[in-house]
Every structure is written in structure tokens, then in C-alpha cells.
Amino acid sequence: MSGLLALLDDVAGIAKVAAASVDDIGAAAAKAGSKTAGVLIDDAAVTPKYLQGFEPARELPIIWRIARGSLINKLVILLPAALLMSSFFPWMIPPLLILGGSYLCFEGAEKIAHVMLPHDAQSGGPDGSHSIKDPLHLEKEKIKGAIKTDFILSAEVMTIALSVIDAGNVWMQGITLALVGVMVTLAVYGAVAVIVKMDDVGLWLSKAGNFAATRSVGRGIVMFMPWLLKGLTVVGTAAMLWVGGSIIVHSVAQMGWHVPEDTIYRIASATSGGVPFLNWAITAAIDFVLGLIWGLILIPFGIKVVAPVWTAVMPKGL
């Protein structure tokens, strides 16, 4: 009898440890997910552009194929790479974060420069033309482009997540990263699906509504959606610069240069009056400005050096 009681006690202890581990994984996943907010907003803002020009019936299947590719990027390719790096090359995490933060700053600054400076407004298909001779081929090309862009953003998400997960237990890290990857993919592409179909919902309500108020709501949704997409683009751009600047400042501190982080901390503390929200807002504003400056510096390098090298190295059609 005493042996049975001891066994039950051991089982209860194991259950408590397992429950604590689940709580730890959930907390770590939530923390890691919150750190990737800027990347997620930008991903949600960027993805709908890949659906422009397609029939409404093709929108959800395309989103599903991009989401499936995103899961493969995160769980099959990036997750094992992140665990190997964490186990054998942890010193690589800060430099990779700086590289990813620089990419975010470049993208955000380029979007602002694109709006502010004169540019060629003409756009076309993958071959530069405006005619769609083969819709199926165009769909495949768009999906390839979206998954390629997602790979870069997913790499940033997984690296950020890895940086805030306590090292030590590789299984805990792996499960947490997998959970973050699935949560992020569901959040981003679920939001994209809702965004791109709201036009259809609004149009249906405006035509099929039994009441004038219902039809008015439908027309309001149709009129509001372009503004929502523009707002997402603005918020996503600002978030990229803020998050990119923050990542770089924090990462260079991890590598031993604490001057930028300490300076920002002193400025925010001195001007916020001890109000937590103001402290956060001032810190985020400084990170945003630093991210914008760094992104503007990177634009010539990215256009004249990185883009040609990327085009030469990547296989044709990717």
C-alpha cells in the first residue's frame, strides 16, 4: 500500500512539473510573441498586396498556400537551424539580430523614401508587363514571392523569439519556438484572410441587407477597408523602424557596447517624470528615429550592392 502511495506521489510530482513546464512554455511564447509585434504588423500589411488582381474565389486558397509555406519556413527550416545555433553557436544570435534589425530599418526607411521622393509609379506583372496571359502561372509566381518574403520575416521572428527564451533546455526551446511559429502564422494569415474578405462581406451586406441600416453598414465597410489597409501600412512601417532600432540598440549592448542603450534609458527616465507609459513612448520614439536614420543610410547599400548580389545568387524564378 505504501508503495502505491509513493508511486501516486511521484506521479503527482511529475504532473506538477509538467504543468509548470506548460506554464513556462506559455509565458515564454507570449513574451516572445510580443517582441515580434512590429514584424507581424508589417507582415499583415504586406501580404494583401499579393492578392491584388485575382478573383475573390482565389483569395482564400492563395492565403492558405502562403500560410502553409510560412509554416514550412518556420517549423521545418528555421526551427532546427535556431536550435542548432542556440546549442552550438549562441554568439551568433546578437549579430543575426542586428542583421535582421537592419533589414527592418531598411525596409521601413525605403517605404518612407518611396512615398516622399519621386519614383516610377508604373507597375506590372513579374515580367514587367501589365497583361496577365496565364493567371495560374501568375498565381504561382505571386505565392513564391510571398513565401520568399515570409522567409525573411519568419527568420526575424524566430531569432527574436529565440533571444528572449531562457537557454538550457533544448526541448523547452524547441516547443516554445514551435508554439510561437504556429501562433504567429495563425495570427498573421488569419488577420489577412479577414482583411481581404471584408470587402466581399461589405458588398454582400450593401446588396442583400434586409434593412437600410444593414445596407449602410455594408457600404461603410466597403468605404473603410482602403483606409484600413493604408493605416496598416503606416503602422507597419512605423513598427518596423521602432522594432528594428530597438533590436539593434539592445543587440549591440549584448555585444558589449552599452552607450546607446544607457543614453536612451537616461533620456527617457529624465523626461518621462516616472510615468511608465511615457517612459516606454519616449524610448520607442528614440528607437524609431535611430531606426529611420540607420535605414536611410542603408538604402544606397541595399539597392546598389545587396539587391544585385541577391538577384545573382538566388535561382531564377525565386
Image: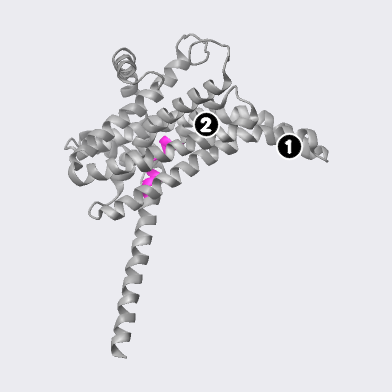
Position of 76 with respect to 214 (left or right) is left
Q: Quadrant of residue 145?
A: top left
Position of 302 with respect to 70 (left or right) is left
Q: Quadrant of residue 54?
A: top right
Q: Kindly identify the amino acid type of the residue bearing the numbered disc 1.
A: Val
Where is residue 160 shown, x and y percent of the image? 32, 41
Q: Magenta span: helix, strand or loop, mainly? A: helix
Q: Which residue is mark 1?
A: 217
The quarter of the picture where the N terminus appears is: bottom left
Answer above or below: position of 144 versus 190: above
Answer above or below: position of 178 versus 142: below
Give the residue furthest to the left: 256
Where is residue 238 shown, x and y percent of the image? 43, 30
Question: Judging from the image, what secondary structure is the residue with disc 2 in?
Answer: helix
Q: Which residue is mark 2?
A: 232
Query: Looking at the image, do the residues carrying marks 1 and 2 touch, with CB atoms under 8 Å apart?
Result: no
Task: Estimate the spatial distance between the alpha carbons at disc 1 and disc 2, rounded to whole Å.
Answer: 21 Å
Identity of the residue drawn at 68% across and 30% down: 222
Q: Nearer the viewer, residue 194 or 309?
A: 309
Q: Nearer the viewer, residue 170 or 255?
A: 170
Where is residue 312 shown, x and y percent of the image? 31, 15
Disc number placed over residue 160 in the picture, else none: none
Identity of the residue drawn at 31% across and 50% down: 174
Q: Kindly identify the amino acid type of the residue bearing the numbered disc 2.
A: Leu
Which region is colored magenta? 31-40
Answer above or below: position of 113 versus 99: above
One can see residue 263 in this view: no
Where is residue 101 shown, x and y percent of the image? 32, 31
Q: Nearer the viewer, residue 1 or 21?
A: 1
Identity of the residue drawn at 31% across and 40% down: 159
